[in-house]
Amino acid sequence: MTEAPAPKPRKGPVMIEIDEAPAFTPSTADPVPDLAPLARPAAMERMAVLATRRPSALARWFWRLFAALFTFVISFAAYDFILRLTERNAILGYVALALTGAFVVVLAAIAVKELAAFARLKRIDTLHRAAAEAATRHDLQGAKAVTDRLLTLYAHRPEINWGKDRFNERKGEVFDADGLLGLAEVELLAPLDAAARREVEAAARQVATVTALVPLALADVFAALTSNLRMIRRIAEIYGGRSGTLGSWRVTKSVLTHLVATGAVAVGDDLIGTMAGGGVLSKVSRRFGEGVVNGALTARVGVAAIEVCRPLPFTKGTKPSVSGTVKRALTGLFDKGQTSE
């Protein structure tokens, strides 16, 4: 049986008739969703936990011995250098000795400044604990002692002179600890609270702007780090705890410890996701959504810094909220209706 010859392929174009046009075309199809996740606070949570973790005893002794050995080696090297130089040329040796002495004097001045900064921060911490204890025990005498120390602390702050006058006029009318502390909080700390809120809003606005508009890699990380450190230092200065380099690190560590202890780095993720991840802003641009997230995290750090650096706990005053701070910070930067979602 012979096989049938295969049909020859048809040359030329082939036309296929379609009765109806397709329902979707490239111009009418839905846009491809951006499936990349927004920045989550987990990274900040890990950073806060690592920063507040106490080093082991072995690590502490390592750094102590390293600092002692390094200081000894540098001192001996400088002494040997000046001695040898003096033997070769007395004038150059005396010049080196004078420069070394001036350097040591500057180091001593820096050390004194750092110690004074630590003393101011300790005074704020002691005042905060005393106020909380007086409020818990309803101790009127303790509250009076706290307010007297608060007036002494702010004796040279001209921006609250009007509040100090009003407090001195009205403190004789209050006969309970809660009322006296609340009066001091309203009259003395209200201007400082407003200034601290403005610092938090400015930092949140800056971080959100850099994240949304600067496409460089790690630019948002650098902006968030510098803005948060500057914000924490400014808040400490506003409440009277001016700090140096080591003092700023101590304040930053205290703020991160407060965030971890209160769970503020983990609580409220749904709120931030609603504001950024599910809003119109992130659908328009993923970078804008990340800007809102980073701005909200900066605001959260700022609120914690206010609680740590404030000499009195919040009683009569209104504690700033993260959502309200972010809305005020981003008003004018992004659309108000978008940030309020």
Image (cartoon, rainbow, N blue to C red):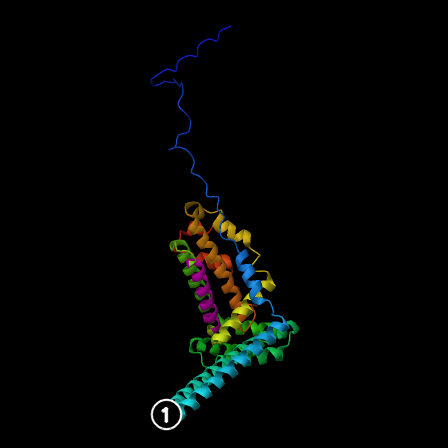
Q: State the image quarter where residue 126 is shown.
A: bottom right
Q: Residue at x 45, y 59 (%)?
A: 221
Q: Position of residue 144 (x, y in %)?
A: 58, 79
Q: Does the image show residue 237?
A: yes
**What secondary structure prevails in the magenta region?**
helix
Q: How many marks?
A: 1
Q: Is residue 243 above or below residue 271?
A: below
Question: Viewer-proximal residue, 73 or 245?
Answer: 73
Question: Viewer-proximal residue, 273 or 49?
Answer: 49
Question: Viewer-proximal residue, 183 or 336?
Answer: 336
Q: Position of residue 148 (x, y in %)?
A: 55, 81
Q: Residue at x 54, y 80 (%)?
A: 69
Asked which secondary structure carries label 1, the reply is loop
Residue lying farthest top? 1
Residue lying farthest left? 12
Q: State the image quarter where residue 105 is shown.
A: bottom left
Q: Position of residue 321 (x, y in %)?
A: 51, 60
On the image, numbered disc 1 is attached to which residue? Answer: 89
Please give the range of residues in magenta: 219-236
Left or right of 2 in this view: 27: left
Q: State the image quarter where residue 149 is shown.
A: bottom right
Left or right of 227 in this view: 124: right
Residue lying farthest right? 137
Amino acid tagged 1? Asn
- Is residue 186 a member of the stretch shown in magenta? no
- Is residue 228 a member of the stretch shown in magenta? yes
Q: Does the image show residue 194?
A: no
Q: Position of residue 138 (x, y in %)?
A: 64, 74
